[in-house]
């Protein structure tokens, strides 16, 4: 039997047009909402159009009409059948006070692994320097770090004028740009089953260990702490957090201990990745400011004790924040009930 | 062996209705991406012009603002627009593409963010080779960022209500209506697939080359003649295309209030 297409079009036309108009209204922005009567009407129009599509498929093949109805049904389907909790508002305090630290703790093992890989890298870097100091030239890519530490310390401590005047904001912006880019890459490389993330963390650890060994061996441990701690207290944890996100992604790719399929596993970790990436960006913005405006000043302009205490205080505060903030909340220890963003 | 990528993704609703989403191919996606990169450069250039005068006040702050603005636009452009326009950037709008949840559900912000944050890994080792390779072998044509975010990119041509009446030139005299019993026999013997071929040929006739158009309508008319033969005095002088048009009008009862209502005589 072939459907009477003319009658079919005449009967359905007004409903399809109404559904199309409703979809246009809803498509104007992410937060477009319907009140109850409008939602009920929308649901009716969706079901009627879906039934028309089914009728058309049963009785005859009219590709143009079917394509039109499929287009309407597919657009309406996602509005009708979205059952996931869905609220997206800018709630930075709530995100900062609960979502971020809870997400961090939920993936504490990935963070521990990220820190362990970096420490192994650091140990390797220190060992490489101890065995062969010339390794520094081959491994360290930054030319300004290749000079002898005591020479640099003497140069830095001889400065009296503000040598960074007129360049601090630019420096901060460049630090932020570079560090956030590198961290997001470490996270993205989680798609290589975590191998790329581990490689980046290890290399970062090697650089840290090698440079630290170089300064300590040259008797410049205090300068090293005064130089690195103020910004490193947030920068290094931020990189570890990026590594954590990459390893969470890598873990979802591998799927150890999970009965879910790959798509379900990736879908489950998506919001946590965004939360961790937001935390990384926030920490690195702060680290960039501190590095440009504070870390590059040394004695006699700025006493090392002040810098070390400032850095240590930041480290303690960050540790307490990540360990304790958001505990006892309604969603503690479980996946966030709503999706939020920084 | 990896199956070749499908052109569409069929979704079955809980009501048992199937609908298909047409997956976007690599060429329109690459064009949309190119367009978006051009837009990013233009936005950056405009913002740079806006920020440059502030260098008079503080060159340091002006340079910092330019660096951070570029970074924010570079990372945030696609993320913001895909969220705000529900899966579309400017490039995707122009090319009629849309990012969708792979289960055809509503796109979440985290999905938009993840697919854009992972763009770096798709770019490796350069020129989107890894992402392109992943999309080429993926059944849903997903680059790695899409796989992680659970998204697909579909083609969304603007589909308007089809004008069947215009295609069939309804309202014109149709000699086939003079013999309702033969028309009824044609309706009875024609399968939906055969009717669809005839209708589709008419809807697309203007896109065919003259020779292909003649051959197509000759073949379709030949098949319809085999199913139910109208007497020669009704078909005399009719081209194959007119024959098919009359038959389709009868098959779909388009433009007629009913076969029996038609006045007789030619």
Image (tube, helix red, strand yellow):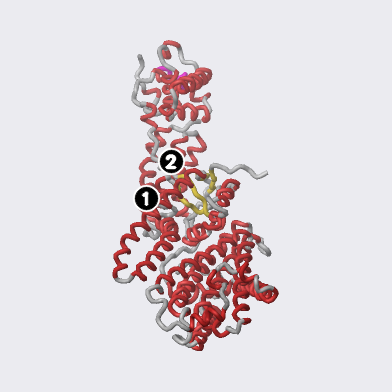
Q: Nearer the viewer, residue B89 or A240?
A: A240
Q: Nearer the viewer, residue B248 or B51?
A: B51
In the image, is residue B213 part of the stretch drawn in magenta? Answer: no
Task: Answer left or right for A337 relative to A163.
Answer: right
Task: Answer left or right for A292 relative to B18.
Answer: left
Residue B178 drawn at (x, y percent): 40, 17
Give the quadrant of residue B167: top left
Q: Secondary structure at mark 2?
A: helix
Count of marks placed on residues: 2
- Residue indicated by mark 1: A24
* Prevailing secondary structure class for the magenta stretch in the rendered image: helix
Residue span colored magenta: B178-183
What chain does badge 1 belong to? A
Name the residue at 39% across, 22% down.
B260
Q: Residues within 10 Å of mark 2 (few under 14, many from 20)?
A: some
Q: Residues within 10 Å of mark 1 (few under 14, many from 20)?
A: few
Is residue B198 visible in the rendered image? The answer is: yes
Could you tell me how far apart the alpha carbons at marks 1 and 2 are, in whole angstroms? 15 Å
- Residue indicated by mark 2: A68
Residue B19 drawn at (x, y percent): 51, 44
Rendered-image quadrant of the C terminus of chain A:
bottom left
Name the residue at 49% across, 34% down.
A61
């Amino acid at each position: 039997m072939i459907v009477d297409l003319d009658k079919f079009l005449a009967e359905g036309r007004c409903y399809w047009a109404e559904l199309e108009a409703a979809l246009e209204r809803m498509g104007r922005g992410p937060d477009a909402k319907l009140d109850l009567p409008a939602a009920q009407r929308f649901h009716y129009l969706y079901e009627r159009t879906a039934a028309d599509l089914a009728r058309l498929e049963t009785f005859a093949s009219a590709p143009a009409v079917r394509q039109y109805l499929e287009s309407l049904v597919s657009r309406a389907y996602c509005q009708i059948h979205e059952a996931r909790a869905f609220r997206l508002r800018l709630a930075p305090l709530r995100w900062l006070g609960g979502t971020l630290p809870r997400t961090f703790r939920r993936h504490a093992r990935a963070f521990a692994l990220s820190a362990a890989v970096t420490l192994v890298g650091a140990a390797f870097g220190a060992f490489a320097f101890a065995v062969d100091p010339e390794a520094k030239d081959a491994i360290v890519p930054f030319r300004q770090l290749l000079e002898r530490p005591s020479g640099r310390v003497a140069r830095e401590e001889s400065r009296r004028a503000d040598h960074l005047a007129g360049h601090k904001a630019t420096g901060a912006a460049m630090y932020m740009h570079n560090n956030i880019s590198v961290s997001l890459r470490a996270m993205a490389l989680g798609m290589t089953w975590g191998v790329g993330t581990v490689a980046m963390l290890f290399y970062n650890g090697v650089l840290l260990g090698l440079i630290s060994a170089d300064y300590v061996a040259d008797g410049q441990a205090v300068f090293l702490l005064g130089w690195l701690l103020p910004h490193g207290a947030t920068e290094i944890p931020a990189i570890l957090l990026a590594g954590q996100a990459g390893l969470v992604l890598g873990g979802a790719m591998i799927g150890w201990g999970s009965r879910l399929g790959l798509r379900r596993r990736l879908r489950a970790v998506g919001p946590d990745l965004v939360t961790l990436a937001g935390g990384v960006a926030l920490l690195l913005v702060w680290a960039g400011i501190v590095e440009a405006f504070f870390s590059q000043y040394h004695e006699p302009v700025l006493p090392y004790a002040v810098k070390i205490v400032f850095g240590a205080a930041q480290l303690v505060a960050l540790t307490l924040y990540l360990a304790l903030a958001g505990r006892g909340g309604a969603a503690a220890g479980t996946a966030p009930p709503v999706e939020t963003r920084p | 062996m990896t199956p070749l990528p499908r052109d569409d993704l069929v979704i079955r609703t809980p009501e048992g209705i199937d609908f298909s989403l047409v997956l976007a191919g690599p060429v329109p996606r690459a064009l949309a991406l190119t367009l978006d990169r051009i837009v990013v450069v233009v936005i950056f250039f405009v913002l740079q012009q806006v920020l440059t005068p502030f260098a008079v006040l503080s060159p340091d702050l002006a340079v910092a603002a330019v660096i951070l603005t570029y970074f924010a636009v570079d990372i945030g452009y696609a993320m913001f627009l895909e969220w705000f326009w529900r899966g579309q950037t400017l490039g995707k709008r122009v090319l009629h593409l849309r990012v969708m949840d792979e289960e055809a559900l509503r796109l979440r912000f985290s999905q938009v963010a993840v697919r854009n944050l992972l763009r770096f890994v798709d770019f490796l080792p350069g020129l989107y080779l890894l992402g392109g390779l992943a999309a080429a072998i993926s059944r849903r044509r997903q680059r790695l960022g899409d796989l992680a975010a659970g998204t697909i990119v579909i083609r969304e041509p603007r589909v308007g209500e089809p004008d069947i009446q215009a295609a069939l030139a309804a309202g014109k005299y149709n000699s086939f209506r003079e013999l309702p019993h033969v028309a009824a026999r044609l309706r009875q013997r024609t399968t939906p697939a055969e009717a669809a071929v005839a209708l589709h040929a008419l809807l697309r006739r203007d896109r065919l080359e003259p020779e292909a158009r003649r051959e197509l309508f000759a073949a379709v008319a030949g098949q319809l003649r085999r199913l139910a033969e109208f007497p020669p005095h009704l078909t005399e002088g009719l081209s194959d295309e007119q024959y098919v048009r009359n038959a389709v009008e009868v098959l779909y009862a388009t433009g007629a209030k009913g076969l029996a209502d038609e006045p007789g005589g030619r």
